[in-house]
Amino acid sequence: MDRQRIINQLQRYVKKAGSQSKASTMLGIGKSTVSIMLAGDPEGKVSEEMWREVEAKTKPASGSQGWNLVETGVYKEITQVMQDVQMEAGCTWIVADAGSGKSTTARHYTEMHPNAHYILCADMVRSEFLQEVGRCIGLKLVGSNLRRHLLEIVDRLTTEEAPILIFDEADKLTDGVFNYFVQFYNMLEDKCGLVFLSTASITQRMQRGLRNNKRGYAEFNSRLGRRFFETEPVSTQDVYAVCRGNGIHDEKTLASIIQDATKYDNDLRRVKKRVRAITN
């Protein structure tokens, strides 16, 4: 384990967060632990498990473990949409194929832009969802009053300059949490950008919700402009660029990887595995 590399990662993380206090909240660890680690932990107070946990949580989206981020078509599309939404305090839902690099792009955007907050969604109840949003913006929520938590999150975001919340895999959220998006929009309209990311499964869910008149769906669909932003599929040129950008230059090897990728919709996760198997 390279502790100096982890310290460097943590330093960048703290700088992006704005303070050690906010960084510790976002990481879910104590402020004193962050301070000790930044100082190099000369007395060995921090466990190996904690070092590895911080390593994983502060690992950058690109340039880590010998893998370089390449600006594919999907990367450029998503980045441009996020820039527009952040600048205009807008609201949109981006749909992209699995394995197209949407999550990596979203995390990289968060690392490179101030007041951009990335939230990885999952099957959560409302209290868990609000706690996760609070953690991701560096806000420690105390107690169990959900309304107060929502207001605290809104208050924090409205103090930032051009903030943006990026909800990745948002289609995994339950209907109960789904309804919270309407409240977020109403309270943050013209004050904070909202971007949701998922695969195309959301289109069928939205159609079912509208057809069955499920609570919140019509309102949320209206706030999204009644449409999803669908990215172009990953192309053969994108696969070629990713391979070249990560050390594959032999044309025969490139052709083999590209041929394999075309069988699987140019899934960049599969491409990454193939490239790493060759270069490592």
Image (tube, rainbow, N blue to C red):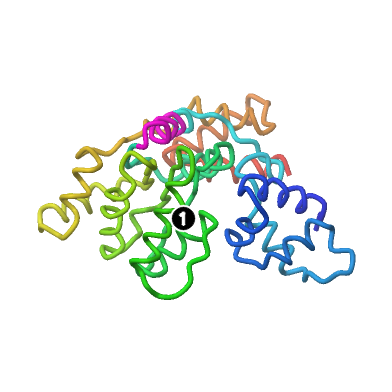
Q: Where does the magenta region start and end?
A: 77-89
Residue holding disc 1: 120
Image location (x, y in percent) of residue 60: 64, 45
Question: Which secondary structure, mark 1?
Answer: strand
Q: Nearer the viewer, residue 121 or 68?
A: 121
Q: Is residue 78 magenta?
A: yes
Which residue is rendered at x = 82% and y = 51% of the image? 4
Q: Quadrant of the N terminus?
A: bottom right
Q: Residue at x 52, y 60 (%)?
A: 139
Seen in the picture, residue 76 relative to 122 is either above or below; the reply is: above
Image quarter of the C terminus? top right
Residue 151: image location, x then y, percent? 37, 59
Between residue 252 and residue 65, name the one nearer to us.
Answer: 65
Q: What secondary structure is the stretch in magenta mostly built from?
A: helix
Q: Is residue 112 above or below residue 38?
A: above
Residue 131 lies, in percent from the top left, at 45, 65
Query: On the picture, is 75 further left or further right than 206?
Result: right
Could you tell me which residue is drawn at 25 percent across and 41 percent down?
A: 224
Magenta-colored stretch includes residue 84 = yes
Q: Amino acid at mark 1?
A: Leu
